[in-house]
Image: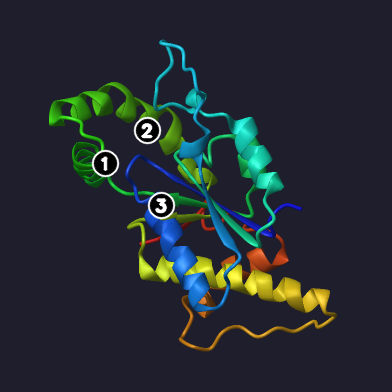
Amino acid sequence: MAPRIVALIGGGQAAGKKSVCNAIVSRLQSWKVTDVKVLSLDNFKKAKIPNNVNPEGPDTYDFVAVASAINSETSDVLLVEGHYTLYEETLKRLGTIRIYIDLDADTRLSRRIIRDTTQRGLSLQAVLDNYLDYGKTAMERYIQGTKPTADIVLMRGTEPSGIELIAGAIYDRLAADKAAASGDNTFNVLSDSTPAWQAPTALSLRHNLLDSEFEVQTENYYELA
């Protein structure tokens, strides 16, 4: 049985996709939603990549294996993060909600430099060469164009209002499913705070998730700054 909710989280290199996943998981856990798992596209890279293929491009991933892993998962909520979660059509069809992290290029590059020099042992020159030869091309040719397919665009990654909206809508969907399974047509949202997803500007987004899945909003996406 596939997960009840599959959230696809995409965006450029070092945009903060894993941090957003962790923030959503943490918020859901604070509401006692614990059956949440995270799946990273990094674990589905092909073993052999031809020399003429961009090592940071979509052809380096086994999307068939990713789709199989999603369909085999039994958790209530599955967060799938990676550069190309919003690029491959099969994955997009499996998603309940599609999220794009739209961090500016300068910030992403600075994060990439810090990460690759401190965690991966690369020299500054090697990081810049990889970015200019592969990362920048992949971003411009493949990743950037997936932004209009997103239901929600997060401009600053783990922005509290954005995380609250996403986690709150997921919680509501789970609560509605539980109520429907028990024959109860009503359900209660949480009251430990003033949830951002109950604000008037978020109501249509929240209701779309409750109906079945998020729909494209406000000229293709919700942009949360």
- Identify the residue at horizontal 26%, vertical 29% (top origin): 131
Q: Quadrant of residue 113?
A: top left
Q: Position of residue 12 (x, y in %)?
A: 37, 41
> At label 3, which amino acid type do we have?
Lys
Which residue is situated farthest in the left direction here? 124
Q: Is residue 131 above or below residue 82?
A: above
| Left or right of 8, for residue 131 | left
Q: Which badge, 1 or 2, comes first in the chain's sequence?
A: 1
> At label 1, which amino acid type do we have?
Ala
* CB under 8 Å between discs 1 and 3: no
Q: Position of residue 66 (x, y in %)?
A: 60, 38
Q: Quadrant of the C terminus?
A: bottom left
Q: Position of residue 177 (x, y in %)?
A: 74, 71
State how far apart marks 3 and 2 are (Cα). Answer: 18 Å
- Residue 223 visible from this viewpoint: no
Q: Which residue is mark 2?
A: 139
Disc marking residue 18: 3
Q: Which residue is mark 1?
A: 105
* CB under 8 Å between discs 3 and 2: no
| Left or right of 68, for residue 168 | left
